[in-house]
């Protein structure tokens, strides 16, 4: 069936789901899953494919059809469950509130170790998305237990739930803006999301910064004290990542504000305070430097089609939930 411009197909059997994916040039096998209670949905719009599934313990293989030479990335969002993914080069584990990014040119095996609810979003690798998984990486796991990562993971589940209630234009806007926000988040936090491969001190520092964005007085001195290190050492850690503390902190704050403007109807002044800006005029100036729009114009552009104030039969209720 077609839900407001998105083609949606629902399956109760894993073999039918596998066949549905094969029609879209994806090869997927699943073995061992108990069918009762499992849910499989495939949504298609333009060149994007999104799947939502709730599946019991199982294992199988996944890849993009070799006959299609278009380069695609697979984003895997896990809300609950545990999976192990492996290809010829790498092995990784996805658990509650984690996000996997995979190069779909590689054939991957997976083992689902418990009942898992997840969403796959298949997107083309292009100028906007190529930095999500820089070559030669073939997979990457991001933590999304808290902060903006969790907000974005929950957002993609909310978007999927609201597909039937949104117009085609609204659904397209939601997916496009989600991908934009996701790319911006990962570009700013990529050096700090994977503890196995990056400086633990940097991870601790940036976790502390994200948790204290509301504090207008947040400084490198406070952060160094929390990390039990010297200011000079922390400066060197940031310099090694080709960043400065102040620029990175401002980017975190502005991105958090953009998400709140997009997701909520909170007053702009309130959002500015929540993100560590005591003066709304200064917040607006810094916001416009990054997005080339004032906060008010940005919100209007993002939410024009969503009509938060007066929901009608054809309106999308997705963004009614406030992000605190």
Image: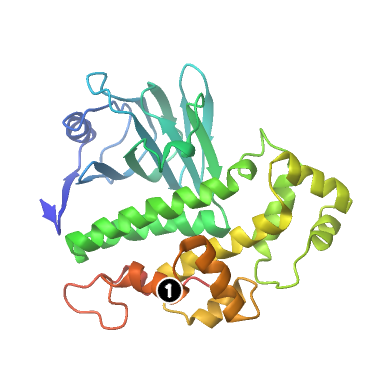
Residue drawn at 46 percent across, 48 percent down: 183
Residue 177 falls in which quadrant of the image? bottom left
Task: From the viewer's side, name the closer residue of 248 and 263.
Answer: 248
- In what element is the residue under mark 1? loop
**Residue 38 appears in the rendering:** no
Q: Residue furthest left?
A: 1
Quarter where residue 311 is shown: bottom left
Residue at the outermost top position: 88
Residue at screen point 36% across, 70% down: 319
Can residue 306 be seen here? The reply is yes
Residue displayed at 31% across by 59% down? 174
Image position, residue 88 (x, y; %):
47, 16
Residue 79 or residue 201, whichever sits in front: 201
- Identified at 64% across, 75% down, the residue is 277
Q: Is residue 134 above or below residue 52?
A: above
Residue 104, image x and y in percent? Answer: 36, 28
The image shows a total of numbered marks equal to: 1
Give the percent coordinates (x, y) of residue 275: 60, 71
The percent coordinates of residue 254 (x first, y second) are 56, 64
Rendering quarter of residue 163 = bottom left
Is 195 located above or below residue 227 in the figure? above
Q: Residues within 10 Å of mark 1 (few under 14, many from 20)?
A: some
- According to the picture, the residue beneath numbered tag 1 turns out to be 264
């Amino acid at each position: 069936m077609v839900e407001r411009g998105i083609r949606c197909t629902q399956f109760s059997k894993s073999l039918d789901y596998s066949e549905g994916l094969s029609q879209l040039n994806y090869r997927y096998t699943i073995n061992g899953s108990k069918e009762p209670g499992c849910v499989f949905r495939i949504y298609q719009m333009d060149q994007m494919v999104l799947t939502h599934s709730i599946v019991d313990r199982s294992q199988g293989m996944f890849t993009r059809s070799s006959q299609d030479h278009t380069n695609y990335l697979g984003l895997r969002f896990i809300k609950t469950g545990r999976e192990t993914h492996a290809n010829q080069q790498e092995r990784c584990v996805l658990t509650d509130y984690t996000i996997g990014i995979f190069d779909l040119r590689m054939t991957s095996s997976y083992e689902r170790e418990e009942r898992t609810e997840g969403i796959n979003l298949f997107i083309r690798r292009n100028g906007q998305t190529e930095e999500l998984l820089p070559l030669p990486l073939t997979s990457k796991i991001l933590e999304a237990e808290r902060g903006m990562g969790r907000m974005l993971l929950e957002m993609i589940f909310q978007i999927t739930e609201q597909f039937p209630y949104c117009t085609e234009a609204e659904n397209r806007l939601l997916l496009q803006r989600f991908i934009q926000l996701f790319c911006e988040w990962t570009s700013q936090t990529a050096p700090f999301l994977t503890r196995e491969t990056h400086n633990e001190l940097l991870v601790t520092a940036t976790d502390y910064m994200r948790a204290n964005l509301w504090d207008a007085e947040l400084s490198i001195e406070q952060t160094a004290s929390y990390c039990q290190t010297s200011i000079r050492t922390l400066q060197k850690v940031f310099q090694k990542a080709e960043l400065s503390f102040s620029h990175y902190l401002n980017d975190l704050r502005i991105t958090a504000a953009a998400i709140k403007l997009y997701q909520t109807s909170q007053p702009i002044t309130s959002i500015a305070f929540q993100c560590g800006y005591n003066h709304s005029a200064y917040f607006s100036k810094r916001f416009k430097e990054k997005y080339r729009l004032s906060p008010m114009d940005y919100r209007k552009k993002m939410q024009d089609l969503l009509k938060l104030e007066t929901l009608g039969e054809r309106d999308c209720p997705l963004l009614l939930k406030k992000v605190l």
